[in-house]
């Protein structure tokens, strides 16, 4: 049995046509792609949409999580990454140092709870108490340590139901980073990461899951991004900051935390600003970073990314962030970043 | 008019073998073979990917992975015992609730229900299978869990609190809540396959026992059910296979805690829920590899359970039209 040569060539040609990629060869064409943290997704979506309308450059962002963002950036499948937790030294070595962490917005993690009979004034906690609750050492609301900080408040005789994140998350990273700083016991037993071994508590999926669980269970306590507590009308505890003041989580106080953080010595902005000094600082604040290549890569796409970053640092874009309850970057930091970017 | 002599040898003329037929037939056969081979190839590729992904964790933990209970991403120590325990226990609870109900409905619809309502009711129950898992999860969070927390769990604790299964604090999300939602999700599968199997039981069985003086219920218990036994077992195992792999509804209701507890009111975790929760944000090769190891174990378990179920159903319903449908 033989196949005629004409037929063989015809079949082969059909297969080859199917194999050729459609847009290879177009120089730097197509959208700029990025992936990473879910926490800043609302503001990133707004920014990218606004930027596309103003300049025509399309940026496609996938909120797959900080870990996923770091992974995709390392493997080169996206042009930039985004993360709430900075890359470790080992991860930076994996990209041979070819990465810049550029802070874009600030976020705050609040401790929220569900105690209906308490009235409108939020409870006061300090680092030891929060760590004690999440370690399981403080298990009842009427514990005298909580009562000591909240004189005059009628705390219920109820067990504390701890709710944490079941999925890996930048929010968890920020929260555990804060706890590691204020509690040696926490640092020794649990540590800080996007996913840890929680001594007690239920896991909720996403900020939404934790919010839902706290809302539904009386006596529950959990940690969520500020915006979730605000939109769901959940109380946020006042925390004692490093200067000894009890502060609430607000945009102003988060920006204050960033302003007072020691940024001069840091060369790559991988700075943790939890438990920041400063009378007005909110203790559980954090940057959210974009991961950008220092050098190399598609020159057209890199130019597009830098153009977006310059646009993002302008007051108009920072105001968009404030409208969505993200704290804008402090002005000195913005100026530093503007100097850092290659000029237009 | 010719007469055919039946005992004379006749020459059977068969069509020519494929190789001698037209070129178009050969090409068609090739394309079909390619399509048919794709599925096993994809399956093999899936297994290969899981295997290579979990090699790191297998090298570090070995079989101890299955017995260890630590799950510490910071210290990179992982153990899947709470996951395996949670998967099995939630599925068993689901079966304990779903099997009597489904079987009861199937028997009722096949033997006792008025003819007019048989099809509509069967159809409605099968529709339960069409509801997405996430919708079940949302319904569980907003409706089922508050109901359980306020009414059902306290009653169980008061009444059966002497058993270690019904002690301890009541949070809401728990192993029992996950088991209940799984039971609801699994019921349509068990019911429809059981019903098909029961319909495949020949009427002679029923008629024979009725002729011997049995009541209708006795006829069902003594002749119909034993005849359909392996098929019903297959349906149950099919439901088990479904419950083992269920992810979204479970993770919303089970409390997501890497812990083994005796109480059914305590939170737990399942293999599928852990993978769904942790995979996208897992930073660190060991964490990813541990999750791939869990996925590999889950894959093996569900393949074995589903293959067993198919074999059992086929054995009882073989030959009738039901057999191929249940398969």
Image (cartoon, coloured by chain):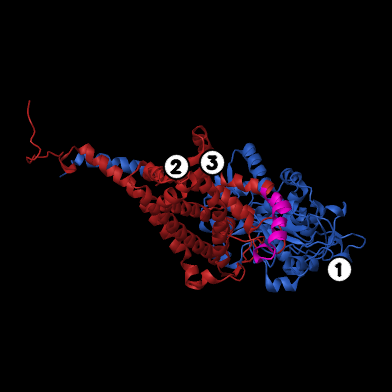
Chain colours: A blue, B red
Residue A114 in view in this figure: yes
Is disc 2 placed on a helix, strand or loop?
A: loop
Q: Mark 3 lies on which chain?
A: B
Q: Do labels 3 and 1 share a chain?
A: no
Separation (CA) of disc 2 from disc 3: 49 Å
Determine which of the numbered discs, if any, sits on residue A23 in the image. Answer: 2
Q: Where is residue B72 in the image (x, y as percent from the top left)?
A: 61, 68
Q: Position of residue B127 (x, y in %)?
A: 53, 39
Quadrant location of the N terminus of chain A in the rendered image: top left
Q: Is residue B249 left or right of residue A222?
A: left
Q: Are marks 2 and 3 on the same chain?
A: no
Outermost top residue? B1
Separation (CA) of disc 1 from disc 2: 67 Å
Separation (CA) of disc 3 from disc 1: 54 Å
Disc 3 residue crowd, few under 14, some 14–19, many 20+, Cα 10 Å: some
Is disc 1 placed on a helix, strand or loop?
A: helix
Residue beneath disc 1: A144
Q: In the rendered structure, which disc, 1 or 2, sits on the residue that comes first in sequence?
A: 2
Which is nearer the eye, B104 or B26? B104
Q: Mark 1 lies on which chain?
A: A
**Of tags 3 and 1, which is closer to the observer?**
3
Q: Which chain carries label 2?
A: A
Magenta region: B144-167
């Amino acid at each position: 049995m033989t196949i005629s040569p004409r037929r063989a060539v015809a079949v082969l040609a059909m297969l080859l046509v199917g194999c050729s990629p459609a847009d290879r060869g177009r120089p730097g064409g197509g959208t700029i792609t990025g992936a990473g943290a879910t926490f800043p997704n609302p503001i990133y979506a707004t920014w990218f949409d606004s930027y596309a309308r103003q300049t025509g450059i399309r940026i496609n962002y996938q909120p797959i999580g900080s870990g996923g963002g770091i992974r995709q950036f390392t493997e080169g499948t996206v042009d930039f990454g985004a993360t709430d937790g900075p890359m470790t030294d080992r991860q930076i070595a994996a990209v041979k140092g070819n990465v810049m962490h550029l802070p874009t917005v600030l976020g705050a993690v609040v401790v929220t709870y569900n105690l209906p009979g308490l009235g409108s004034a939020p409870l006061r906690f300090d680092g030891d108490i929060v760590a004690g609750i999440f370690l399981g050492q403080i298990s009842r609301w009427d514990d005298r340590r909580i009562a000591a900080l909240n004189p005059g408040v009628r705390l219920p005789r109820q067990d504390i139901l701890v709710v944490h994140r079941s999925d890996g998350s930048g929010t968890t990273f920020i929260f555990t980073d804060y706890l590691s700083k204020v509690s040696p016991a926490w640092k020794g037993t649990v540590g800080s990461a996007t996913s840890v071994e929680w001594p007690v508590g239920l896991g909720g999926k996403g900020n939404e899951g934790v919010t839902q669980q706290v809302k539904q269970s009386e006596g529950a306590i959990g940690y969520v991004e500020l915006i979730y507590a605000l939109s769901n009308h959940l109380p946020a505890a006042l925390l004692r900051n490093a200067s000894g003041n009890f502060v609430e989580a607000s945009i102003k106080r988060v920006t204050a935390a960033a302003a007072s953080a020691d940024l001069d010595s840091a060369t790559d902005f991988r700075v943790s600003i939890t438990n920041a000094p400063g009378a007005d600082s909110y203790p559980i604040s954090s940057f959210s970073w974009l991961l950008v290549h220092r050098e190399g890569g598609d020159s057209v796409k890199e130019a597009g990314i830098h153009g977006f970053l310059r646009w993002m640092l302008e007051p108009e874009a920072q105001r968009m962030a404030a409208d969505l309850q993200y704290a804008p970057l402090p002005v000195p930091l913005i100026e530093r970043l503007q100097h850092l970017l290659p000029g237009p | 008019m010719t007469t055919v002599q039946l005992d004379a040898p006749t020459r059977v003329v068969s069509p020519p073998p494929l190789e001698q037929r037209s070129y178009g037939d050969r090409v068609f056969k090739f394309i079909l073979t390619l399509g048919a081979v794709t599925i096993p190839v994809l399956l093999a590729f899936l297994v290969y990917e899981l295997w290579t992904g979990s090699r790191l964790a297998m090298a570090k933990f070995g079989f101890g992975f299955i017995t260890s209970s630590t799950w510490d991403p910071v210290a990179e120590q992982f153990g899947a015992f709470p996951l395996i325990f949670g998967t099995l226990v939630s599925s068993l609870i689901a079966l304990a609730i779903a099997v009597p109900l489904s079987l009861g409905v199937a028997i009722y619809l096949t033997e006792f229900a008025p003819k007019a309502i048989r099809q509509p009711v069967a159809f409605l129950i099968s529709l339960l299978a069409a509801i997405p898992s996430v919708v079940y999860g949302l319904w569980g969070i907003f409706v089922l869990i508050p109901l359980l927390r306020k009414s059902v769990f306290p009653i169980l604790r008061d009444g059966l609190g002497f058993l270690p299964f019904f002690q301890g604090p009541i949070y809401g999300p728990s192993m029992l809540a996950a088991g209940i939602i799984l039971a609801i999700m699994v019921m349509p599968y068990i019911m429809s396959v059981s019903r098909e199997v029961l319909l495949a039981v020949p009427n002679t069985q029923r008629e024979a026992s009725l002729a011997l003086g049995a009541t209708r219920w006795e006829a069902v218990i003594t002749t119909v059910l034993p005849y359909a036994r392996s098929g019903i077992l297959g349906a149950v195992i099919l439901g088990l296979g479904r419950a083992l792999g269920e992810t979204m509804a479970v993770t919303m209701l089970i409390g997501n805690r890497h812990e083994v507890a005796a109480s059914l009111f305590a939170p737990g975790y399942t293999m599928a829920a852990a993978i769904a929760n942790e995979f996208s944000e897992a930073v660190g090769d060991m964490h990813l590899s541990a999750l791939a190891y869990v996925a590999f174990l889950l894959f093996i378990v569900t393949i074995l359970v589903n293959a067993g179920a198919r074999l059992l159903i086929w054995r009882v319903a073989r030959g009738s039209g039901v057999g191929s449908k249940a398969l």
